Image: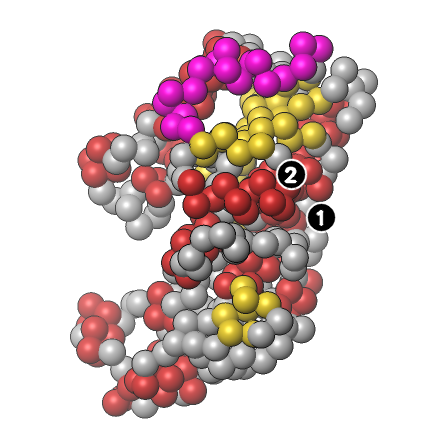
C-alpha cells in the first residue's frame, strides 16, 4: 500500500520539505497565498493548489489519493490568532477570520477519514475552544491522539522555539520520536557561521537571498554598542529609546539584541530581518539577519529558492514566508514519527 500525504496550509513548504526528507510521499499542498506557489512547487516538485480551505471538499482531497493508499493529512492552520502576544485579547482572537480554520481541517478529517493526521501550532492553541472542538472531532472518529509541546533545540533546530505538535492515528497509539539532540550542542554558528560577510543593506552577489535590511544611523550606532547575548542596557544613555527610559519599558529587554555564536538563536518570526523587533542582530556583523540566514535558522536547505524570477522581488513577502513556515527539521521529525508508527503496523514507506 502506498503512503501518500496531503499538506493543508502548506505555505512555501517547510512541513512538506521535512516530510519528503523523512521519506514520505507528499502528493499535494493547499494554500490561499499565491506568492507561495513558486517556492513550494520549485523546491519540492509537488503540486500547489491555490485554494481557500473553506471551499475545499473532502471528496476533492480524497480523490487525490490512490484507491489503496494509506492516507495522511497534515497541516498547520495559521497561528496568529493564538500567539502569546495576541492571546490576551481573546475576544479579538475569536473575531479573527483565521480563528476557526482549524475546524475546517477537522471537517476535512471527518470527510476524508485519513489513517494518520498531524497538526502543528503554537502552544497557546490548547487553551481555546476551537482546539477542544478539534479534539472532539478526532475522538468521535476513533483516532488515537498524542499531543505535546516540543522544544525545538531537542531536535537540532537552533531556535528558542516551542511548538505544539499533535499526531493521531486510526491504527493505534502514536507518538513523536524521542529527542535527537542535546540543546547545548545546537549553535547558531553551525547554521550561519560560514556565510560571507555582509554590510547592513547589502546583497551577496552570489546569493540574492543573502541580503539584509539597511539600518538608520542611530540603529547602526546602537548595534555597534551591542554585545553578543546583551541588551539595550549595554548602550550609552544617549542611544537608548525613549520608551526604554520610562519605567514601563524597563522589562522589554528582548529587543535590539545580538545573537551569540555558541548558543541557540531566537524564535524566527516574520520580522526576523529587523534589528529592533527581537534578538536578531548578527553575532559579529553590524546588521540584522539576512533573508538567507533566517531561512537557514528555520532549517531550510541552503539551496532552497524563494525568489520567483518572473515576479518582482518583495523583501517583506519572502521574510513572511520564512517566518510563517514550519521549520523543515520539525517537519522531518513529524515525518520520522509517522514512518516509525507505520512500520509498527507493517506498513512500509
Taking the spot 36% from the left edge, 33% from the top edge, the residue there is 127
Which stretch is magenta? 51-68
Image quarter in which the C terminus is found: top right
Q: Image check: 345 left or right of 162?
A: right
Residue 218 horizontal/vertical position (percent): 30, 84
Taking the spot 39% from the left edge, 76% from the top edge, the residue there is 214
Taking the spot 62% from the left edge, 54% from the top edge, the residue there is 304
Q: Where residue 45 is drawn, which disc sits there?
A: 2
Image quarter of residue 66: top right
Taking the spot 32% from the left edge, 34% from the top edge, the residue there is 98
Which of 55/216 is in front?
55
Residue ID for mark 1: 180
Mark 2 is surrounded, within 10 Å at the Cα level, by few (under 14), some (14 to 19) or many (20 or more) other residues, namely few
Q: Is residue 119 magenta?
A: no
Q: Secondary structure at mark 1?
A: loop
Give the mark nearer the N terminus: 1 vs 2.
2
Q: Are marks 1 and 2 in contact (CB under 8 Å)?
A: no
* Distance (Cα) linking label 1 and label 2: 28 Å
The scheme the figure's colours follow is: secondary structure
Amino acid at each position: 500500500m502506498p503512503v501518500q500525504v496531503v499538506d493543508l496550509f502548506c505555505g512555501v513548504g517547510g512541513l512538506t520539505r521535512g516530510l519528503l526528507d523523512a521519506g514520505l510521499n507528499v502528493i499535494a499542498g493547499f494554500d490561499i497565498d499565491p506568492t507561495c506557489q513558486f517556492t513550494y512547487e520549485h523546491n519540492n516538485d509537488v503540486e500547489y493548489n491555490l485554494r481557500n480551505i473553506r471551499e475545499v471538499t473532502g471528496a476533492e482531497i480524497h480523490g487525490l489519493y490512490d484507491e489503496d493508499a494509506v492516507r495522511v493529512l497534515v497541516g498547520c492552520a495559521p497561528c496568529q490568532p493564538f500567539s502569546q502576544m495576541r492571546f490576551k485579547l481573546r475576544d479579538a482572537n475569536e473575531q479573527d477570520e483565521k480563528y476557526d480554520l482549524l475546524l475546517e481541517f477537522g471537517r476535512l478529517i471527518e470527510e476524508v477519514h485519513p489513517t494518520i493526521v498531524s497538526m502543528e501550532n503554537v502552544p497557546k492553541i490548547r487553551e481555546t475552544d476551537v482546539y477542544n472542538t478539534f479534539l472532539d472531532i478526532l475522538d468521535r472518529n476513533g483516532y488515537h491522539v498524542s499531543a505535546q509541546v516540543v522544544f525545538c533545540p531537542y531536535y537540532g533546530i537552533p531556535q528558542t522555539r516551542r511548538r505544539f505538535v499533535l499526531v493521531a492515528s486510526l491504527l493505534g497509539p502514536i507518538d513523536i520520536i524521542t529527542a535527537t539532540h542535546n540543546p547545548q550542542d545546537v549553535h547558531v554558528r553551525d547554521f550561519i557561521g560560514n556565510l560571507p560577510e555582509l554590510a547592513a543593506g547589502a546583497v551577496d552577489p552570489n546569493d540574492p537571498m543573502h541580503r539584509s535590511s539597511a539600518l538608520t544611523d542611530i540603529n547602526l550606532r546602537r548595534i555597534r554598542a551591542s554585545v553578543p547575548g546583551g541588551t539595550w542596557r549595554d548602550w550609552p544613555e544617549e542611544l537608548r529609546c525613549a520608551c526604554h527610559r520610562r519605567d514601563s519599558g524597563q522589562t522589554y529587554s528582548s529587543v535590539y539584541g545580538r545573537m551569540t555564536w555558541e548558543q541557540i538563536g531566537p524564535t524566527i518570526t516574520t520580522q526576523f530581518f529587523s534589528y529592533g523587533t527581537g534578538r536578531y542582530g548578527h553575532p559579529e556583523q553590524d546588521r540584522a539577519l539576512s533573508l538567507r540566514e533566517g531561512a537557514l535558522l528555520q532549517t531550510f536547505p541552503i539551496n532552497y529558492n524563494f525568489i520567483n524570477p518572473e515576479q518582482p522581488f518583495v523583501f517583506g513577502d519572502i521574510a513572511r514566508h520564512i517566518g510563517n513556515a514550519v521549520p523543515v527539521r520539525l517537519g522531518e521529525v513529524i515525518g520520522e514519527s509517522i514512518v516509525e508508527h507505520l512500520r509498527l503496523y507493517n506498513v512500509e514507506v
